């Protein structure tokens, strides 16, 4: 059984993330979407809120599991019996950063393979940070995020 982990902050999940999840679920027998708790960042949503948004957005994908973790992704994939870290790329600038991370992960755990998927071009400009900034100013983000994220953003920013 092939198991992959797609980790990230997902604050909130966007259609770009969902694109990678849907395509990853077609490649792997089991895909774990793992929300990373990063104590250095101040996320808008709690880990529990982010997991709930992802669960709702992926409810129709049977081989997707949503989880959360602290620490290193290589330690997490080892615990979960996965050998593949799935990562999405939006632009060439993402690749340079992700290549360094993939090399570090491989050095720490030699069974850790990283698979990169290019985000669909129609989602390549979307980032969680941009979505939060746009939503913070009351603009409609429903074409950038799944409904669960849209509702959560509207509630968080008191948008009617």
Image: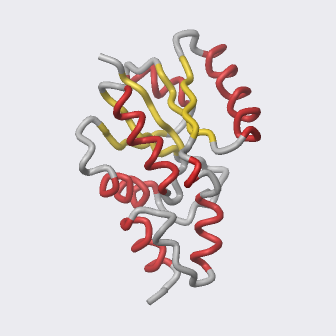
Counting from the top left corner in percent of width and height, residue 84 is at 48, 22
- Farthest residue to the top: give it: 110
Rendered position, 131 above or below 86: below
The residue nearer to you, when weighing 43 against 56, is 56
- Farthest residue to the bottom: give it: 160
Residue at image coords 43%, 79%: 155
* 19 sits to left or right of 59: right
For the N terminus, the image quarter is top left
For the C terminus, the image quarter is bottom left
Q: How is the rendered protein coloured? A: secondary structure
Counting from the top left corner in percent of width and height, residue 94 is at 71, 40
Rendered position, 68 above or below 155: above
The residue nearer to you, when weighing 126 against 102, is 126
Counting from the top left corner in percent of width and height, residue 20 is at 47, 41
Residue at image coords 56%, 54%: 122
The residue nearer to you, when weighing 79 against 90, is 90
Rendered position, 127 above or below 119: below
* 134 sits to left or right of 70: right
Residue at image coords 59%, 47%: 38
């Amino acid at each position: 059984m092939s198991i992959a982990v797609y980790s990230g902050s997902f604050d909130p999940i966007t259609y770009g993330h969902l694109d990678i999840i849907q395509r990853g679920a077609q490649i792997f027998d089991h895909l774990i979407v793992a929300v990373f708790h990063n104590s250095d960042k101040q996320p808008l949503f709690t880990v529990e809120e982010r997991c709930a948004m992802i669960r709702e957005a992926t409810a129709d994908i049977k081989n997707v599991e949503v989880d959360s973790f602290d620490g290193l992704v290589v330690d997490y994939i080892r615990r979960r019996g996965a050998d593949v870290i799935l990562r999405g790329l939006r632009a060439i600038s993402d690749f340079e950063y992700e290549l360094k991370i993939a090399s570090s992960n491989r050095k720490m755990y030699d069974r850790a393979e990283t698979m990169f998927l290019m985000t669909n071009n129609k989602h390549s400009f979307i980032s969680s940070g941009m979505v939060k900034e746009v939503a913070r100013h009351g603009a409609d983000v429903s074409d950038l995020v799944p409904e669960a994220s849209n509702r959560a953003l509207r509630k968080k920013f008191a948008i009617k």
